[in-house]
Amino acid sequence: MHRRQISAIAHTDHPVAAPLSDDSVRALLDRALPSGDARLLDLGCGSGTWLMRAHAARPGLRADGVDSDSEAIAAAERAADEAGFGDRIAFHAQDAGEFSSPHRYDLVLSIGAAHAFGGLLPTLTAAGSHLAPGGTVLLGDCFWERAPGPETLDAGFAVDDYDDLATTVDRVVAAGWVPLHGHVSTLQEWDDYEWSWTGSLSRWALDNPDHPDHGEALDAASGHRDAWLHGYRGTLGFVTLLLRRATLP
């Protein structure tokens, strides 16, 4: 079973691929997009959830979404067409790091996609290259709520995967960015996300007992649940930062 297929099923009931509640997503978009006629870019857009939620309250918005997962992009295009946003959102199935556009954007999103760029600061560099003067970046990434212990490391993490929150923000500031707002996901948001992730995948497996991927899906859900509950719960954090350059490039 391909990792992307597992992820698509696991996010059935929690389409935002990050530990963020609907209220948090709404509040972050309200902070980041006070104007209804901005131009928006999502690097690593997945199924386009952030873009469509932004458009629902801002009919004048124009947007591009980029993701290397062609199946997710196809699903995003179908969803945008069904919602009536198809003429205002353009989706691109390609490596987000290689995306180029004649436009400059008022807001660049990259939520939980730092792995696609090789880390936090390379993600900021990529996002910044697409910004219009005075534009902002909405960046979401993990950090260590506390130093990872053996259980977290046994779950597949390394100590140097992330920094603590203060160091994470310090690195962003040292790279020339000013935080305008931030949201640290709560334990409740993490729990809701993880229960939804593992539960959606488990439900799919139980509903499809004759599917050749039935057993693999159950194993993936069980393994993920064990890594969360016995490994990184309460240790791995997630922060979403609204950032603007300290000086114009």
Image (spheres, rainbow, N blue to C red):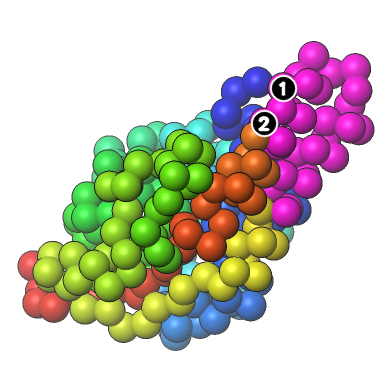
Tell me the SS state at disc 1. Answer: helix
Tell me the SS state at disc 2. Answer: helix
Looking at the picture, tell me which residue is in the foreground, 21 or 86.
21
Looking at the picture, tell me which residue is in the foreground, 82 or 13.
13
Q: Where is residue 89? Give x, y as percent.
A: 52, 56
Q: Residues within 10 Å of mark 1 (few under 14, many from 20)?
A: few
Q: Are marks 1 and 2 in contact (CB under 8 Å)?
A: yes
Q: Where is residue 204? Give x, y as percent.
A: 83, 35
Quarter of the C terminus within the rendering: bottom left
- Residue 113 among magenta residues: no
The residue carrying mark 2 is 220
Among all residues in the image, which is located at the extreme top?
212
The secondary structure that most of the magenta stretch takes on is helix
Res 233 visible: yes
Horizontal arrangement in the rendering, residue 26 relative to residue 101 (left or right): right
The label number, if any, that marks residue 175 in the structure image:
none
Res 134 visible: no
Q: Is residue 184 above or below residue 118?
A: below
- Mark 1 to mark 2 CA distance (whole Å): 6 Å
**Which amino acid, mark 2?**
Ala
**Which amino acid, mark 1?**
Glu
Horizontal arrangement in the rendering, residue 101 relative to residue 57 (left or right): left
Horizontal arrangement in the rendering, residue 28 relative to residue 142 (left or right): right
Q: Where is residue 144? Give x, y as percent.
A: 39, 60
The residue carrying mark 1 is 216
At a point 60% along the width and 23% down the height, the residue shown is 2
Q: Which residues are magenta?
A: 195-222
Q: Is residue 78 above or below residue 62?
A: above
- The quadrant in which residue 25 appears is bottom right
- Residue 200 among magenta residues: yes
Among all residues in the image, which is located at the extreme front?
150
Q: Where is residue 135? Give x, y as percent.
A: 27, 73
